[in-house]
Image (spheres, rainbow, N blue to C red):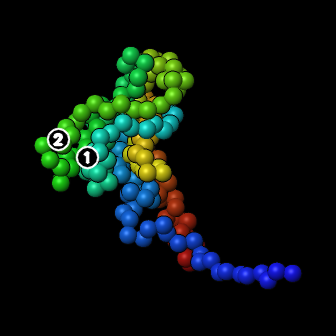
Amino acid sequence: MAKQTTHQTQPNREKNPRRQPTASGEKDAAVNRNASHNYFLLEKFEAGVALTGTEVKSVRGGTSNLKDAYGLIKDGELWLLNCHIGPYDHGNSANHAALRTRKLLVHKEEIRKLIGKTQQKGLTLIPTRMYFKNGRIKVELALAKGKQLWDKRETERRRTADKEAREAISRGRKT
């Protein structure tokens, strides 16, 4: 009978502890906080982004902004407009333009579904966050409907009421 050898394995460690949290996918590269304030987010889906090399390096560095960005379907393709990705610090004269139109990569079936939904009155595509997934940059798009001023006030009222209720419950538990 052959002798069995046992080897010890170390517990699950991080792949590379020196890697940035944004690049490793632990932290979002950009978040659109105004999206949930200004819109009712009805449906969310994921799309890849066609970027140049300096754009990817800038996103890793955290210089991207989705505040005024929106999605648009044109000629059967999905595009991301007004997404600001700052210039790469160590780039040369071939650096990218900060506000260029970027192509979003999704399946044709999803584009067909979105064409029907975005043609309804008042619905638009808003990017909510940009993040890394398996080394690739992804954008989370939401099908959104604009809020009126009174909708925003109602949301704020509901949020403060929930906060006060949680505080009252926690005070009750402490005594």
Asked whether the beta carbons under mark 1 and mark 2 sit within 8 Å of each other, the answer is yes
> How far is mark 1 from mark 2, CA to CA?
9 Å
Q: Residue at x 24, y 33 (%)?
A: 100
Quick one: label 2, few (<14), some, or many (20+) residues within 10 Å? few
Quick one: label 1, few (<14), some, or many (20+) residues within 10 Å? many
Give residue 39's position: percent from left, percent from top: 40, 35
The answer, for residue 153, to whether it is visible in the render is no
Residue type highlighted by circle 1: Thr
> Which quarter shows the C terminus?
bottom right
Compared across the picture, whether 119 is left or right of 93 comes to right
| Residue, disc 2 | 94
Q: How many marks?
A: 2
Compared across the picture, whether 44 is left or right of 104 comes to right
The answer, for residue 72, to whether it is visible in the render is yes
Q: Which type of secondary structure does the marked residue at label 2 adopt? A: loop
Q: Nearer the viewer, residue 117 or 52?
A: 52
Give residue 50's position: percent from left, percent from top: 36, 36
Q: Which type of secondary structure does the marked residue at label 1 adopt? A: helix
Which residue of the protein is positioned furthest toward the right in this rendering? 1
> Which quarter shows the N terminus?
bottom right
Q: Which of marks 2 and 1 precedes in the sequence?
A: 1
- Residue 61: name its quadrant: bottom left
Q: Nearer the viewer, residue 37 or 88?
A: 88
Give residue 139's position: percent from left, percent from top: 41, 41
Compared across the picture, whether 14 is left or right of 50 comes to right
Task: Specify the label residue 170 is tagged with.
Answer: none
Task: Specify the label residue 54 is tagged with.
Answer: 1
The relative height of residue 109 versus residue 165 in the rendered view (above or below) is above
Give residue 170's position: percent from left, percent from top: 53, 69
The relative height of residue 97 versus residue 165 in the rendered view (above or below) is above
Q: Residue at x 40, y 45 (%)?
A: 137
Which residue of the protein is positioned furthest toward the front in this rendering? 1
